[in-house]
């Protein structure tokens, strides 16, 4: 399983339960798969192609739905690069600092991925495991 570790100061020292699938906002009128492919490339510099398997969406505490697609690939992770975001850092300092949206990616066997992934996305891995059996 390819997972991404969020960038930025909040996530720096977090590991287990912090990794995620690359994801982003869906623009109105844009196909979910097209959006997922675009966001994947923006966040990783890798290109998602192949046969895509839609997974059951999962819900954030905010109520937003996360739509995910599984596909098989063997990426050269040396090609990884992420887009960035800017925030005031340190807080209330008046200074702005840029951070990568994703600071690293890695392949994990399923049992390890289930420990690494953020809790609300765990159903995605469970479903994928069941469907691949």
Image (cartoon, helix red, strand yellow):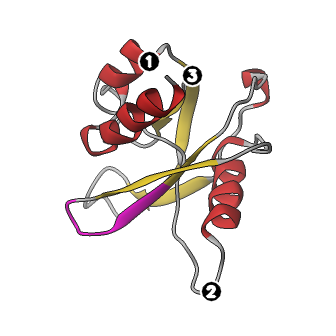
Residue 85 in the image: above or below residue 16: below
Q: Would you call the spot at circle 3 few (<14 residues within 10 Å), some (14-19), or many (20 or more)? A: some
For mark 2, what is the residue?
29
Of tags 3 and 1, the one toward the viewer is 1
The residue at the point 65 percent across, 79 percent down is: 30
Is disc 2 placed on a helix, strand or loop?
Answer: loop
Residue, disc 1: 110
Residue 65 among those drawn in magenta = yes
Q: Secondary structure at mark 1?
A: helix
The alpha-carbon separation of the residues under discs 3 and 2 comes to 32 Å
Q: Quadrant of the N terminus?
A: top right
Residue placed at 71% from the left, 38% from the top?
A: 81
Whole-angstrom CA distance, mark 3 to mark 1, is 12 Å
Magenta-drawn segment: 61-67
Q: Which mark is residue 106?
A: 3
Residue 100 visible to the viewer? no
């Amino acid at each position: 399983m390819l997972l991404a570790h969020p960038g930025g100061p909040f996530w720096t020292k977090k590991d287990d339960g912090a990794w995620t699938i690359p994801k982003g906002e869906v623009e109105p009128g844009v196909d979910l798969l097209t959006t997922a492919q675009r966001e994947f490339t923006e966040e990783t510099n890798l290109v998602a192609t192949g046969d895509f398997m839609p997974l059951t969406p999962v819900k954030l505490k905010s109520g937003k739905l996360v739509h995910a697609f599984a596909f098989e690939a063997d990426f050269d992770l040396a090609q990884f690069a992420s887009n960035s975001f800017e925030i005031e850092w340190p807080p209330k300092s008046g200074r702005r600092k840029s951070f990568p949206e994703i600071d690293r990616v890695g392949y994990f066997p399923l049992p390890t991925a289930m420990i690494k992934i953020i809790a609300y996305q765990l159903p995605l891995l469970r479903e994928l495991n069941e469907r691949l059996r």
